[in-house]
Image (spheres, rainbow, N blue to C red):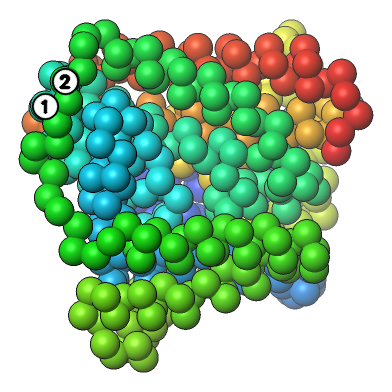
Amino acid sequence: MLGVIATFAAFALIIVMVRLGKDLGLAILAGSLILLAVLAPASIPSTLVTTLLDARTVYLIVISFVIVLFAEIYEVTGLVNEMGLGLARALRNPLLTVMLVPAIVALLPVTGGALMSAPIIGGIGKVAGLSAEEMVFANVWFRHIVFLSYPLNQVMIITSAMTGVNVITLAGIQVPILCFSALIGYLLIRKRRLNDGLEGVSEASIPLRYSLSPLVAAVLLALTLRYLMGPFGMPAGVALAIPLAIITSWKLGKHDLSSTLLKALRGRKVWAITFTAYAIMLLQHSMKSTGASSTLAKLLSLIPAPTEVLYVMVPAVIAVLTGSTLSGVVLSIPMLPQLPNTVVATSLAYVSALIAYIGSPMHLCLIYTAKYFGEKNLRPSYRYLLIAILSTLFFAYLYLTLIVQRFPLG
């Protein structure tokens, strides 16, 4: 009983701290220390050290650092904004622009990314005759569903490290879910005839090939080197693309390369996310070493519902409550009973947390986008979000349990 109480207290603390706007890494660290202090106080020093020396922890720290540093360089140089404008001009088709610009800008986890694509969606959306709530939905939905199959997504990498499922495998089996969610989004905004034109969208300062090439190089190098070198090839590939991003910033008048790198390194987000990678692995080690994960799994197995349903409900609820996909995955996976097919279990938890998070009233991208388009509350946008979220979760459940579960993956 003490183990159950301590675990729920630790999780409650994490959720409350996140809701209060505290750093996720600090919240997870606090929860982990409470769990250890109550159930195994003598093991705190050894667990801290063991977690740090774990190869999975080292991998997460390294890849978290290089990916966020790469994204920060894109942001501080203004390349991410130039890429969005260049894409809008290159696509020419308003509907494709509405769908693809938020998705491609999202490939870089930059601060306020939703607000970077919002002006483009606003300019195209007005010409296309979209309402404010349709533009809110499009900007948020298409920005986030791309993470269903993007192997450099931070949460997917962390999920892979926690479960042992290959990140490429996870991204690959979720392609049909990505296609379905894109189709649902398309149908929801394709209610009226879209007009042509790109009025309201500024010209990019540099050609698209310059602003887009470092991102393309990072993805290709990461995947190629992972195939050749193993998991650590992914951070190596992204690291090799960082100089290309800095050099490309010359085109925007950023001539001091060292100051560009230093400015990116001073970004709080770089170090916060790197620390969060360690905190997440500490929580997993803490729950395993104290037996908390097995205790919670036994309790959840008593709920009169299929285990696969729990893999949808628990991550989704936590993600909605915390406004964080990462929280939904990190807090749910250690407590859920095991499924025979690890790939299905991992994908169910990841997809459920991600898709439910999109509609969370605490989701900052949703809140900021609604404010940008002049929506006083989120109610109008939920007419579209709820249909898209529930449809995608239902499809994902059927696809993963009825099709993927039949194959011996993982």
- What numbered label is drawn on residue 127? 1
Residue type for callout 2:
Asn
In the rendered image of this protein, does residue 13 appear above or below residue 250? above
- What numbered label is drawn on residue 115? none
Residue 288 visible in rendering = yes
The location of residue 69, given as percent across then percent down, is 46, 71
In the rendered image of this protein, does residue 67 appear above or below residue 245? above
Q: Total number of numbered labels?
A: 2
Image quarter for residue 235? bottom right
At a point 57% along the width and 68% down the height, the residue shown is 238
At a point 45% along the width and 66% down the height, the residue shown is 214
Residue 277 visible in rendering = no
344 left or right of 140 in image: right
36 left or right of 184 in image: right
- Depth check, front residue: 256 or 248: 248
Q: Considering the numbered disc 1 on the image, is that residue within a helix, a strand or a loop?
A: helix
Q: Considering the numbered disc 2 on the image, is that residue within a helix, a strand or a loop?
A: loop
The location of residue 101, given as percent across then percent down, is 33, 41
The location of residue 406, given as percent across then percent down, is 87, 18
- Depth check, front residue: 334 or 33: 334
395 left or right of 168 in image: left
- Tell which circle, 1 or 2, labels the residue nearer the N-terminal end: 1
At a point 29% along the width and 35% down the height, the residue shown is 97
The residue that label 2 is drawn on is 195
Mark 1 burial class by Cα count in 10 Å: few <14, some 14-19, many 20+? some
Circles 1 and 2 in contact, beta carbons < 8 Å: yes
In the rendered image of this protein, does residue 132 appear above or below residue 121? above
